[in-house]
Amino acid sequence: MMLMVQDLRVTFPLDGKTGLRAVDGVSFDLAPGASLGIVGETGAGKTTIARALLGLHPPGCVQGSIRLDGRELVGLSEEAWRAIRWRRIALVPQSVGTALDPVYRVGDQIAEPLRYHLGLSPAEAWDRSLELARRVGLEPRHLRAYPHQLSGGEKQRALLAMALSCAPDILVLDEPTSGQDMLSRARLLDLLDALCREGGMGLLVISHDLAAVARLTERVAVLYAGQLVEVGPTAEVFQDPRHPYTWGLLHAYPDMSTARDLRGIRGAPPDPANPPPGCRFHPRCTQAIDRCRREEPPLREIGGRWIACHLGGLQTLLRAEGLRKTFFVDGGEPEERVEAVREATLDIREGEVVALVGETGSGKTTLGQMLVGLLPPNGGRVVLEGRELTAAKGKERRAMMSRIQLIPQDPFDAVSPRLTVAEMVREPLDIQAIGTPEEREAKVRQALQTVGLPTSSDFLARRAHELSGGQLQRVVLARALVLEPKLIVADEPVSMLDPSEQARVINLLKEIQTERGLALLLISHDLALVRKIADRILVMHRGQIVEEGPGNRIVTRPEHEHTRVLLEAAPRLG
Amino acid sequence: MRRLGGEVWFGLILLALCSAVAVLAPVLAPYDPRAFSGQPLERPSRAHPLGTNDVGQDILSELIYGARVSLTVALAAGAGTVLLGLLVGGMAGYAGGWLDQALMRLVDGMLSLPRLPLLILFATFLGSGLPQTIAVISFLFWPTTARVVRAQVQSVRQRGYVRMARQFGASHPYVFLRHILPAIGPLIAYGLVTSAGHAVAMEAGLAFLGLGDPLVKSWGLMMRFALNLPGLFLTDRWLWWLLPPALCVTLLILALALMGIGLEQNLNPRLARRWR
């Protein structure tokens, strides 16, 4: 093992007593010729790690152990570090603009480490510089230029040439692609990719550019608030993220193959000077439990992946196995039965937006009603948070029902004509016996505010027939929210509204979904609509789920015949 | 709620009048109805506006106190009928499935039985107290109500908001009391009024046949005593002895029937158009 980092902690003194811990207990290793990506949001501590590897922090800030071929680097003198920088570990820094000295020619700057570290003569050094320049795609004229005469991409290449000059064992790239246009970024990635293949050199890529990391590295470590939350093979981690943070990060990343609107992770990264107790991600996590608020989860191996999560990573919120529903035509022959749902199996993870699409009569609504426990299935089972919903009774059923809510297609049918708005929205709280009457009242007002409805006493006293369809659907949404469910099943929630109101309600639904971190199953016949918000799409046809996949894949490369039919039929203007 | 029609108001006023008489009987009646306040078979006079019966009791007082009996029966038997009907029909309609099938076959069976002979049979065996009368009437008349209630419950049960309440974790009793009962409220009112009407007629009939409580003088019993007098129709005595209780029974039934018709129009807008 060439580089072994163990329990690396970097603390910057803030004032006399307290310190700001930018990196807290990070461990990883890097074999010769291997590559590792470290990804995370701004401020997660990525650059701090890079600088620690080069001994660039003031003495005393770095604790833990960094071993290079068995030799401990933490605590080395500046003298000893100089022998390691450039020759053993080289860094291509993030800020291209300031990393080059403006008063020296670029070629001289590339030659400088050669002369200084390798003791080459000026002529030898210049020759090597020319060769290095060629390797990184620079021409001799670039070497004679001053930094301000080069473009950003060319400067980046010059810095790369410098880093490569002493043939280091480990190359650390800090945000190699930041600030570059897409074309020069692509060329740079090609170049780096080729350099890595030449062999021998360990590569550490630190970036928030997930595509660059995916391209350059075999393994990836996800950093959050100074701690690693997930480590695994890059392709696997990006294909199937297991930690809730990784999942959120990937969904926030724009990708040409994504049709969906970008979604952020709710909340903001914690203040490094004052991180939350327990798991640092818990305030933003959709599945946090009590333990997450108290205990820090260790990074442990779960199924070939290292994950720091008490729950072992993203949880399956709802799982349906082999659901069947057959309706018998009253008084008809045995043949006259309708197999509305045949062996439907699906799962919905925490915080995920899944769309169930299919034409009328494909069994979508029946499936949705079975999932929320409104309709008993003829076969199969529904498991909600590890407990079987289909078998639950009494108190247990009541408790489970508060976790999952339905928004039906027809808002006029979904509310009692005899109740006022306040009574409608309060009903779930009454049933679940939550809080005092005043608390219920407050929750009702809050829910109404969330969905953008007035909370005046005049409005609260209105009845269903005094509201518009859009208002009523919002009331239904507010009613579904008062119990703070984990999953909302929305069955064609906007199909009875006009287009402009449709857009508003869908955006509202999406906003609430992200903000509250709840999972959403959107049942719709409208592919054009669902692809804007769905992470995953299930296609249903004649009572079966015939295709399942990420939204973009379903829309761009449908596999099942019926999906293509649905895509053909999707509305187009012009 | 649609506006109540004229016939409902007419019925209500009649019923209110009848109730007022029943409540204020001690004040209104000139004599204790059991007291032998005059000579037997007196003709109407200033002292006895409707004369006296064959044992010398004041007929007007009897008539006034009779309202109490008829209204008690109307209310109790009406409520009994509706309660039984609501219980069976509500259960059948809400639960569905085999329970629905079983209960509805029971209803069919009950409806196919001839009521009057059964009524007489029951009355004979159970004795002739007022509570027995009420029980027998309730028992014989609930199936009609049960059927109507079941149909309505079945339809309301499928409404989104009723099913949604289950989705919030509500128990079946909650759903039934909070959503289904209010939804079939008008139906219950209608059922109450119509079965009260039936009950009044039935009680009068039973009493008339001599199967009522001989000690509780209802209008039916008065008629029976009047008719027991040999040669009642030979004189004009029937005008003040037989006719007043008969008229009272008729008016009370009419009042209840009119209210029933009005409420039915309220339940079924299609009927309203035909009637108005």
Image: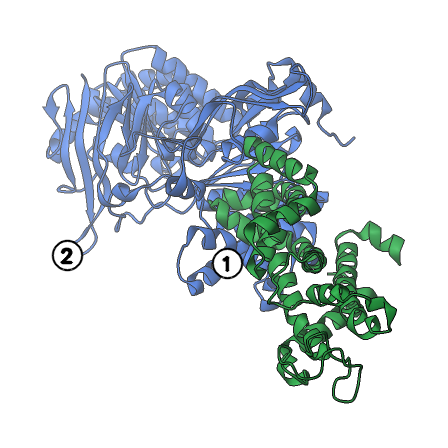
Chain colours: A blue, B green
Q: Nearer the viewer, residue A299 or B129?
A: B129
Which amino acid type corresponds to the residue marked 1 in the rendered image?
A: Val
Task: Mark 2 and mark 1 in contact? Answer it, CB < 8 Å.
Answer: no
Horizontal side, residue A220 vs residue B196: left or right: left
| 10 Å crowding of disc 2: few (<14), some (14-19), many (20+) | few
Which amino acid type corresponds to the residue marked 2 in the rendered image?
A: Gly
Up/down of A509 relative to B13, above or below: above
Q: Residue at x 37, y 29 (%)?
A: A106
Please state the horizontal and vertical placement of residue A93, each as a whole percent of the image.
33, 33
- Subunit bearing disc 2: A
- Subunit bearing disc 1: A
User: Badge 2 is on which residue?
Assistant: A16
Up/down of A169 relative to A252, above or below: above
Residue A439 in which image quadrant:
bottom left
Up/down of B188 relative to B34, above or below: above
Please state the horizontal and vertical placement of residue A345, each as a whole percent of the image.
49, 21
| Location of the N terminus of chain B (image quadrant) | bottom right
Q: Secondary structure at mark 1?
A: helix
Q: Nearer the viewer, residue B157 or A182?
A: B157
| Location of the C terminus of chain B (image quadrant) | bottom right
| 10 Å crowding of disc 1: few (<14), some (14-19), many (20+) | many
User: Badge 1 is on which residue?
Assistant: A444
Q: Secondary structure at mark 2?
A: loop
> How many marks do you count on the picture?
2
Q: Residue at x 58, y 37 (%)?
A: B103
Q: Nearer the viewer, residue A302 or A404?
A: A404
Query: In this rendering, does residue A125 appear at all?
Result: yes
Please state the horizontal and vertical placement of residue A507, each as a whole percent of the image.
59, 44
Q: Nearer the viewer, mark 2 or mark 1?
A: 1
Q: Residue furthest bottom?
A: B46
Query: In this rendering, does residue A475 appear at all?
Result: no
